[in-house]
Image (cartoon, coloured by chain):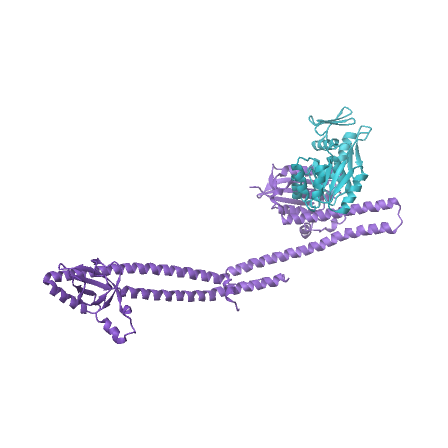
Amino acid sequence: MKILVIEDDREAAVYLEKAFAEAGHTAHVAGDGETGFALADSGDYDVMVVDRLLPRRDGLSVIAGLRSRGNETPVLILSALGEVDDRVTGLRAGSDDYLTKPYAFSELLARVEVLNRRASAGQADTVYRAGDLELDRLSHTVKRAAREITLQPREFRLLEYLMRHAGQVVTRTMLLENVWDYHFDPQTNVIDVHISRLRGKIEKGFDKPILHTVRGAGYMLKAG
Amino acid sequence: MALSLPAIMRTTAARLSALYLLLFALCAVLLVIYMTSLSARMLAAQTRETINEEVQGLDRAYRRGGLPVLVRVVEQRSRQPGANLYLIADANGRILTGNVESLAPGVLEIEGWTEQPFSYLRYGEVRAAESDGPSNVSLSEARHNAIALVSRLPNRMIVLVGRDLGEPERFRVVVRRALMFALGMMALGGLLIWYFVGRRALKRIDSVSEASARIMDGDLTGRLPVTGAGDEFDRLSENLNAMLIKIAGLNEGLKQVSDNIAHDLKTPLTRLRNRAEAALSGRPKAAGYREALEGTIAESDQLIRTFNAILMISRLEAGYSAEALSKVDLTAAMHDVVELYEPAAEELGVSLEATEAGSFTVDGNRELIGQALSNIVDNAIKYSAGATEKPAVVVTLTRADGEIRLCVADNGHGIPDGQDRERATERFVRLEQSRTQPGSGLGLSLAKAVMKFHGGRLDLLPADPGLSVVMSFPETR
């Protein structure tokens, strides 16, 4: 995956470049808004990571400028401004995701991978499949090895999100944001308990585990 | 208080005084002009009437006895003190008799009313003026203005009856003098008023300025002077004093919070540092380093969480933009949180239930309400777990006393002491029994700030057993 990082803090930018490379991606770094805009406009990137407060041109204006030129590259805003209304203005400017500094790299990586436009091409499918697990979005039914599994509405949405991003790491905050639409950090491990409930329903009685815990990062749904 | 004129003119009192003075003076001048023009017109009409009557009288005398009688009557009337002007001239305009010695040329040539006032000289005045000294009084100065009616007798002789205009002129002089006097008095009055009222007000304002300068210099205990007169200055001072008291309170709160922040952030920072130091000083294996680093990350995550909560509370207290507000379905928001926590509660053996007495909507922010409620529910689950045989948390949504109340009640140990209950929502306050539980001590403070932001309240009430935390929202109009 080709990633453009627009970040003015040298140290943070170098760290991101290295960390993305270790994860198997190519990252290019721009140190200010204008350079970033020029690079994004000419290069073919899969995902962009943009800081909000940048020299020469601020992040929101870079994104808005790209969108007005028809550039639809997924953008994740990385910002120290993390209040409710900051998030709203960020998403309104045309970004696809918003992560507040300080952040865990595992969180950023998981989000960037989910944003990758090539990986998420098949979002419109009505039926998601992962190994012998099958989720029908229209009839709201879940089957594993042809056996029907009954899920609560929220469990269904949880599984739907996990299956849409099957093979990708999904963090607890991503689940909280996308399944519950909350952006705060619950003090207790509420998500873990929901996952273990779901796991009980889709793994109990079957020999192979399908919902995996990725240590220090989150969860991944993967067959085999 | 020595003030230069420009400095005086910069004061409101002086400006107002000057403005009023100008306004009144203008009114007075306009009034006087109106009055004089009106009375001048009345005087002129009266003069003409008198002259008409005289002419009629002379006409009768002429008819009765011809020219000799007319001349006699004219001579007789001319000699009376303050007499009108009388003149009889021949057809060529040569003066035969009367009390006019000379008059402006051309006056006798036109019959009827003289269109303009003309100048004339009374009989005998020239000699009197000359005897005073030939050069002292010029001839033109001795002349007077008058209006007159000129008519011709059947034998082409000219008869003029006129009236001196000195009287209206004297009247005008009197009025002008009165006007000047009145204006002078007004100016004096304005100055006096400014001196006593304006200066006094100025002094009061100066004392307020001085007091506020002292307060700005750092003496926050200083207060503005209140004289007890109960006037607008006192009201102003009282309000400003109330504001100062509030500022001092906020300042005190800020100081307390920064002390608490210092404590609550320094403690984990110290732990963080110690952990890193310990890892460096010993000779641990790779696993030891790993453990130390993981601990460091966990510790810094907790720090970030505390920091975020502090930031959020101050942002809430400063107020969000109206953009962050919308209609929030409180019933749905409640069920969302309860549903989020239900499995976690069950794992701890706590039953978590929600009931509502209808569907309620408030103006607010779902995210903030959700966070506040989840903090409260989180607490309730933690403190009821293991406290009784059947720990239970009940969330109810009701309407009462014009408020929408979201109540979270647990059956744990509660907070028996009323003072402790009040303190529980203060920042960083962690009551003794909660010291062992993880948390930043900001959960309830954050919930309180969220409720305040929504124009509502957060109350902690004893539930016997347990604690019930009530979020009261104002009902949407």
> How many tags in the picture?
0
**Which residue occupies the foreground of this view, B310 or B73?**
B73
Q: Quadrant of residue A4?
A: top right
What residue appears at the point 42 percent right and 67 percent down from the top-left corner?
B188
Left/right placement of residue A139 relative to residue B195 reads right
**Which residue occupies the foreground of this view, A157 or A122?**
A122
Left/right placement of residue B474 relative to residue A5 reads left
Instruction: Specify the colour of chain B.
Output: purple
Colour-to-chain, cyan: A
| Placement of B154 over or under A7, stated as above or below | below
Q: Position of residue B59 (x, y in %)?
A: 14, 60
Left/right placement of residue B75 relative to residue A121 reads left
Q: Quadrant of residue B75?
A: bottom left
Q: Position of residue B389 (x, y in %)?
A: 74, 41
What residue appears at the point 58 percent right and 59 percent down from the top-left corner?
B241
| Placement of B273 over or under B212, stated as above or below | above
Q: Position of residue B78 (x, y in %)?
A: 18, 68
From this viewpoint, is residue B354 visible? Answer: no
**Which residue occupies the foreground of this view, B449 or B197?**
B197
Q: Quadrant of the N terminus of chain A?
A: top right
